[in-house]
Amino acid sequence: MNEQEQLELINRATAEKWENLDLSGRGLTELSPAIGQLTNLTILSLSRNQLTNIPPEIGQLSRLTELYLSSNQLTAVPSEIGQLTKLAKLHLWDNELTAIPLEIGQLTGLTNLYLSRNQLMEVPPEIGQLPRLTTLDLSRNNIRFIPWEIAQLPSLISLNLRENPVHMPPPEILNLDEYGKADLIKIRSYFQQLAEAGEDRLFEAKLIIVGEAGAGKTSLARKIQDSANPLPRPGESTEGIDVYSWGFPLSESHEPLSISFLVDSYNQSSSLYPEFRVNIWDFGGQEIY
């Protein structure tokens, strides 16, 4: 369907006050901004096209209750989607989305949100502002952390996390079933216990190096600490135990080592990441040790 055909159809739908428009599988590569004229629409289907973006005029469809955008090539969703406050079902699965607009939190009537088969790496805490959400499908993305706000969704009964590298909450808490659905009872209990008890942050570890005499343990320990450190002199050996301290800044590229770090990370800036310290224990290789 070319642009002229789109305009003709939109003009007809506007004149006849259509409430349902199905443009699925019509080979669309671009959606005309004139779509914003269809203010009587309650259902709009645009699935199985080649759309890479959606015009901001989509936000003018104030009566829309169902929006189908699955199986396109969308890389982003316009912030204006937050104006669709009557929207109950939003299908965005099988696209190329890398982020969810924060305005998603304005869709207070949303009950079903499908985001599977995208390239999402995180879930915005604003999703926790959807009081009627019952179904959230995040399967087959690159999500590592689930924000505690999801556990606060009062109506949520189905959370699909299949094929995501989720580290937090840990797998034993997610307890995914054969279909990838998470155990919401365990997740809610987990975050509740964290909120009540809290947990100290640990940014320290112990590294023990053992081996035969002359194997290079001390050389390894010194170079780990600082690549500029000199190697041991010939004949120099460790007697007993030598302890070295190695510190490096913990950045966003490193795995958070504290659960509480996750819980309140939304209230902190990345500049507050602390230094991680490793205590390197270099054991002597003589048989007596």
Image (tube, rainbow, N blue to C red):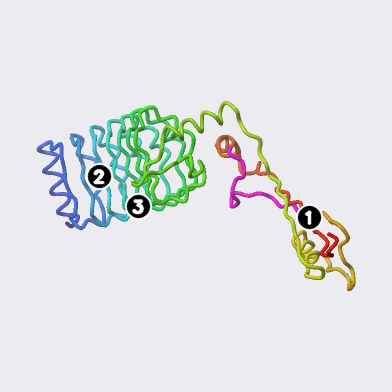
**Please, what is the three-letter code of the amino acid marked with disc 3?**
Arg
Label 1, label 2: how many angstroms apart (C-alpha)?
59 Å
Label 1 packing within 10 angstroms: few (<14), some (14-19), many (20+): some
Q: Which residues are magenta?
A: 244-259
Earlier-in-chain disc, 2 versus 3: 2
Circle 2 is placed at which residue position? 68
Q: Mark 2, mark 3: which one is toward the viewer?
A: 3
Q: Mark 1, mark 2: which one is toward the viewer?
A: 1
Circle 1 is placed at which residue position? 281
Q: Which residue sits at x=25%, y=36%?
A: 61
Q: Position of residue 285 (x, y in %)?
A: 82, 64
**Please, what is the three-letter code of the amino acid marked with disc 1?**
Trp
Q: Which residue sits at x=27%, y=34%?
A: 88
- The residue nearer to you, when weighing 237 against 30, is 237
Q: Quadrant of the N terminus?
A: bottom left
The local secondary structure at tag 3 comes to: loop
Earlier-in-chain disc, 1 versus 2: 2
**Please, what is the three-letter code of the amino acid marked with disc 2?**
Tyr
- The residue nearer to you, when weighing 30 against 230, is 230
Q: Position of residue 83 (x, y in %)?
A: 33, 34
Instruction: Count the labels in the image.
Output: 3
Label 3, label 1: how many angstroms apart (C-alpha)?
46 Å
Label 3 packing within 10 angstroms: few (<14), some (14-19), many (20+): many
Q: Is residue 206 left or right of residue 70?
A: right
